[in-house]
Image (tube, rainbow, N blue to C red):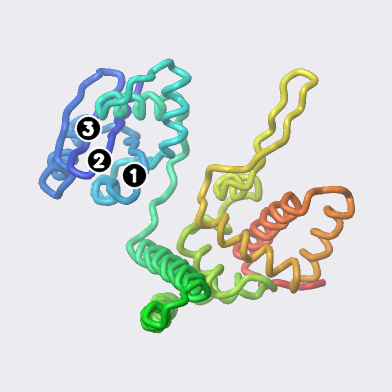
Amino acid sequence: MDKVVGIDVSKDRLDVHVEPSGETFVVGNDHAGIEELVRRLGALSPPAVGLEATGGFENLAVAALSAAGFGVIVVNPAQVRAYANALGKRAKTDPIDAAVIAAFIAATKPQLRPLRDAETKALAALVTRRRQIVQMIVAEENRARMALARQAQKSIKRLLTALKRELESLDGDMDDHIRASPAWRVKEKLLASVPGVGRTVARTMIAEMPELGTLDRHQIASLAGLAPWTRQSGKWRGKSFIGGGRSRVRAALFMAALVAIRHNPVLKAFRDRLVNAGKRKIVAVVAVMRKLLTILNAILRDQKPWQTA
């Protein structure tokens, strides 16, 4: 059996477990600790190193391990926890989690995917920050409608002015990033050719789903978390659900689908057929999201803009 490494990531440390030998060790989650990690794993030459996505604490280790030539897999914590429950491992400590991650990688053999380069990560960070600023603007506008005191209204107005100025600055930074890459300019133009897909959605897709255009429609839907889960046992058939995958991509596609339902004749007709056939409206919207993603995937694959006919 090939060696597989599982790493549990926390803010200050990395707990490492090697399968099948059971070797364990701990290093700091800093430059010195990760240099030691790369050195020790270099002697083992594992084909796969798995880490949980932990809100960014894994980024330094992922970048260093990838640069050192290791096959790095960033796994979904919910999937790892479900795997641990299936094994009957109820206890949860950092060393146990590292062992479970290694066992999960060994058992499921997830596909190695190319990591995003530094420029794509920088664009993704700007997209994320823009979304946060927009959420703050919406929150302050809601507070403005409820505020009665003049002083509170003035405070909200000042903050809204500052937030909108920051939003303009972020949009400028994103424009600079897109202009710096001819490939991104072409992608943005192709994606934005679809009625319902604006610059923000196009840039979210470029930053958060660099695989777009390289996978088939089933794979890309699964990656976005738009492939429905079938629930069936014997003659019983439950409702199918979507979930997992990349929530930021789904959020962008949801907003794009709502716009497309009004302004894209092809997707509007598709949604209307589903509703007229008895589908719930939210189910029809999800179907539009999935169809829209398939269209965007095909557009980048074929390098041809949207055509109505």
Q: CA distance from mark 1 to mark 2?
A: 8 Å
Name above or below for residue 61 compared with residue 299.
above
Can residue 183 be seen here? Answer: no
Residue at (76, 18) in percent of width and height: 234
Which residue is painted at 34% across and 44% down in the image? Answer: 54
Closer to the camera in the image, 291 or 13 = 13
> Image check: 33 left or right of 267?
left
Q: Residue furthest right?
A: 276
Circle 3 — which element? strand
* Mark 1 vs 2, N-terminal side: 2
Callout count: 3
Q: Which residue is mark 1?
A: 54
Q: Is residue 245 left or right of residue 240?
A: left
Instruction: Tell which circle, 3 or 1, labels the residue nearer the N-terminal end.
Output: 3
Q: Tell me whether the residue at label 3 lies in contact with that at label 2, contact meaning CB atoms closer than 8 angstroms.
A: yes
Q: Residues within 10 Å of mark 2 (few under 14, many from 20)?
A: some
Image depth: mark 3 or mark 2 in front: 2
Image quarter where the C terminus lies is bottom right
Separation of residues labelled 3 and 2 (CA atoms):
8 Å
**Residue at label 2?**
10
Where residue 268 appears, as percent x and y from the top left, is 79, 65
Residue under label 3: 15
Q: Earlier in the sequence, mark 3 or mark 2?
A: 2
Where does the image place residue 101, in percent across and percent down from the top left? Answer: 36, 29
Left or right, 243 with reference to 231: left
